[in-house]
Image: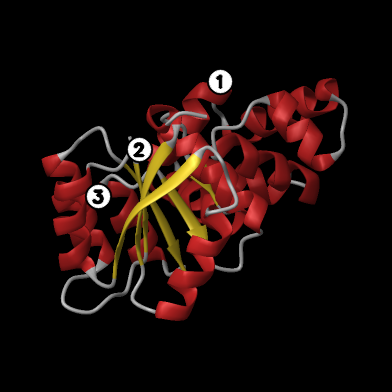
Amino acid sequence: MIERQQIRLLIAEDQPLIRKAVVALLELEPDISVVAQAADGVEAIQAARAFRPDVVLMDVKMPRLDGISATRAILQDNPDAQVIMLTTFETDDLVFEAILAGAKAYLLKDAEEKEILEAIRAAARGEPRLSPRIAEKIIGEFRRVKFPERAEAQLEREPLTEREREVLAGVAAGKGNREIAKELRLAEGTVKNHVSAILAKLHLRSRTELAIKALSGK
């Protein structure tokens, strides 16, 4: 694979051991090239300006400048860059601030290696990815802000099943029925039926509306 076909990646992580572990993981992937590393938000901005990465793997809490502020600055300089938050923090305010700052994905550090690699490749294609717990937070906030009484009353009468919540997390992460079916080991038609049930319970018209509104908050 030639260089221009590789995903150019910047890693911003203040803990050296974690940074080295992530680099070691990514060096095994022929389609990903780590072009720069940063130990804080200030270094991340400088590195992004110097190396123009396609994707930035960004920690949230870092010295000198946090990852959310760094994300805003990087995207202001280069709107085509895609930022993935990879962090141990999942508090509501940090999640929503990161999404509003322009992060394309929000993953927790306990994510599987496969999930991190998929998120990097998806971000390079302009597709969002969220850890399931983060997806649920965003969906919950969307319901609370947009139609709190109607949604909560409906869900009290007919709550989402565990399987529907798993499918919902996949939809919110921008995944198609086939990908969700493969991950959950279900028939594609079964996933489609689950999506229809979820939309009915949440009073939404389409999976596109669900995914877009969940991520944008609009």
Q: Quadrant of residue 95?
A: bottom left
Q: Please state which amino acid type lies under the numbered disc 1.
A: Ser
Q: Residues within 10 Å of mark 2 (few under 14, many from 20)?
A: few
Residue at the farthest front position: 2
Asked if labels 1 and 3 touch by Cβ distance under 8 angstroms, the answer is no
Kindly report which numbered mark, 2 or 3, lies closer to the viewer in this rendering. 3
**If you read the primary sequence from the N terminus, does the residue marked by circle 3 or circle 1 appear first?**
3
Distance (Cα) linking label 2 and label 3: 11 Å
Q: Residue at x 65, y 46 (%)?
A: 155
Number of on-image labels? 3
Q: Residue at x 13, y 42 (%)?
A: 76
Could you say which disc has been placed on residue 216 in the image?
2
**If you read the primary sequence from the N terminus, does the residue marked by circle 1 or circle 2 appear first?**
1
Distance (Cα) linking label 1 and label 2: 15 Å
Vertical order, 82 against 85 (above or below)? above
Q: Please state which amino acid type lies under the numbered disc 3.
A: Ala
Q: Secondary structure at mark 1?
A: loop
Q: Which residue is mark 3?
A: 101
Q: Residue at x 55, y 40 (%)?
A: 173
Q: Which residue is mark 1?
A: 206
Distance (Cα) linking label 3 and label 1: 26 Å
Q: Please state which amino acid type lies under the numbered disc 2.
A: Ser
Q: Nearer the viewer, residue 165 or 3?
A: 3
| Residue 214 visible somewhere in the drawing | yes
Left/right placement of residue 116 relative to residue 162 reads: left
Vertical order, 92 against 210 (above or below)? below
Kindly report which numbered mark, 3 or 1, lies closer to the viewer in this rendering. 3
